[in-house]
Image (spheres, rainbow, N blue to C red):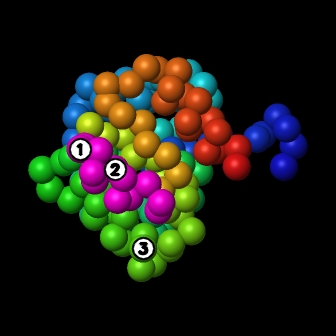
Amino acid sequence: MSPLFKRRKRVLLLDDDPSMHRLVARLLGNEGFRVDVFLNGSQAITALATETYDVLLLDLMMPVEGGMTVIRHLRVKNPPMLKRAILLTASPDSLIDALSGEVSTVVQKPFEPKQLIDAVRLMSES
């Protein structure tokens, strides 16, 4: 593929907060990423079955089927993809510590825009 037609890096965002959707899509879109937003774990799992993502941003604290749903699915179906996951969360430290060996990194909410951009950029280049 020629450099003129370079594929945009794709990010799967699983979060139930519309303001977070807008913020992350704007921040990462300005950096050249394509962001696909999902409101629950089932939607994200369906997308993962048919699409290729460079980075997964997973919110753990959701009322139904949050990031843990996707993590449990990936543990069974695609363990290497867990290393492409970034937890985007305000979850308690004990939960984050329990998952830190499985996922790439954690971005704590609230976050600085540069912190999120740097984490996604680093993940997408590895």
Q: Which residue is mark 1?
A: 92
The span shown in magenta is 91-102
Q: Residues within 10 Å of mark 2 (few under 14, many from 20)?
A: some
Residue 11, how many percent across, how many down? 51, 44
The residue mark sitting in front, 3 or 2, is: 2
Secondary structure under the numbered disc 2 in the rendered image:
helix
As for residue 95 lying within the magenta part, the answer is yes
Query: Which badge, 3 or 2, comes first in the chain's sequence?
Result: 3
Identify the amino acid type marked 1: Pro
Which residue is more in the foreground, 97 or 49? 97
Q: Is residue 74 left or right of residue 90?
A: right
Which residue does the image show at 42% across and 36% down from the upper left?
107
The image shows residue 11, relative to residue 28, as above or below, that is: below
Residue 69 position, x and y percent, is: 28, 64
Cα–Cα span, label 3 and label 1:
21 Å
Query: Which residue is nearer to you in this view: 70 or 93?
Result: 93
Question: What type is the residue that disc 2 sits on?
Answer: Ile
Label 2: which residue? 96
Distance between mark 3 and mark 2 Cα atoms: 16 Å
What residue is drawn where x is 25% and y is 43%? 91
Q: Secondary structure at mark 3?
A: helix
Residue 112 at what x, y percent from top left?
43, 20
Q: Secondary structure at mark 1?
A: loop
The reply to whether the C-beta atoms of the residues labelled 2 and 1 are less than 8 Å apart is yes
Task: State how far apart marks 2 and 1 are (Cα).
Answer: 7 Å
| Amino acid type at image mark 3 | Arg
Picture layout, residue 42 above or below residue 85: below
Pointer 3 residue: 75
Discs 3, 2 touching: Cβ within 8 Å = no
